[in-house]
Image (tube, rainbow, N blue to C red):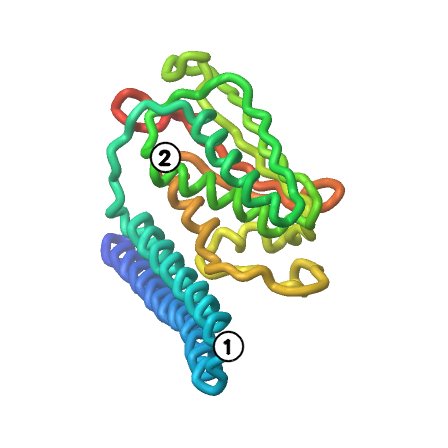
Amino acid sequence: MLGSRRDEFSYLAREFDEMAARLQQAAIQQRQLFHDVSHELRSPLARIQAAIGLMQQDPRSAAAMAERIGNETERLDQFIEELLTLHKLEAGATNPAREPMDVMELLADIVQDAAFEAKARGCIVTLDAPGSFVAEVAGEPLYRAFENVVRNAIKYTAPNTTVEVCAHTFGASQATDDGAAWLEIRVSDRGRGVPVALCEEIFEPFRRIEPQQRDAVTQTVPGSGLGLAIARRALALHGGDICAMPREGGGLAVIVRLPAMTTNGMPMSK
């Protein structure tokens, strides 16, 4: 039996079995991706078609239906952009130039814009990010990662609550002016949170936690389900990571860790 053999032939057979299993898993994931993309495209297209039908039936509703069509078209455009971004990050095709950047300043700009958006729900976004953290980064993917995390917190936090963004440095390194090797950013909301068992799943593409899974009471918040997946892959591009955990007192905390970069653009070792 091959299972009991220890020669090169048995080793080759095991390698072949593992490769076949990986190919099978990749095929399953591809079929799931096609299904998810199809579903995400059908929903706004169906609403656009319904709006056109209503507009034809009642010309007086033209203005309202035109606005609805515009909103759905904007969502489609955003979805396609996010899908292309995710594909580039997963395929490894994105290898943008890196440049020295104060990540604390980048985070401050994102929070300032997010705070304006949060006002519509009566929410506040606070930032506690003292000092600086200058690192060799790809600005656009990193901006998208931070923005997606902060906007996700605003989306799910309860009305009239505060989203807290806190950043601090740790470790020792010669790569940054203040000697820090790592930056940790914690974004905390006061929503209904996510069960511990599902905290890892929210970083998978198209994975949205349904209201009953969140133990929420009203409706699912619309979205493509790609924001946190893009954030994880953008952070991985920089040698960083991201995770989530329930927040004490209710809500969710998303923790981002970003390493300083050496002059050749490689992440510092932990």
Quadrant location of residue 137?
top left
Q: Is residue 52 above or below residue 245?
A: below
Asked whether residue 70 appears in the rendered view, the answer is yes
Q: Nearer the viewer, residue 63 or 77?
A: 63
- Location of the C terminus by quadrant is top left
**Residue to which mark 1 is pinned:** 61
Horizontal placement of 88 versus 120: left or right?
A: left
Judge the density around disc 2: few (<14), some (14-19), many (≥20) Cα neighbours within 10 Å. many
**Residue to which mark 2 is pinned:** 238
Q: Is residue 191 above or below residue 142?
A: below
Q: Is residue 174 above or below residue 261?
A: above
Horizontal placement of 270 versus 247: left or right?
A: left
In the image, what residue occupies the spot 28% across and 54% down? 11
Q: Position of residue 253 (x, y in %)?
A: 62, 41
Q: Is residue 1 above or below residue 144?
A: below
In the image, what residue occupies the spot 59% across and 26% down? 128
Asked whether residue 1 appears in the rendered view, the answer is no
Q: Position of residue 59 (x, y in %)?
A: 46, 81
Tell me the number on the disc at residue 211: none
Q: Position of residue 113 (x, y in %)?
A: 50, 38
Q: Are marks 1 and 2 in contact (CB under 8 Å)?
A: no
Q: Secondary structure at mark 1?
A: helix
Amino acid type for the residue under numbered disc 2: His
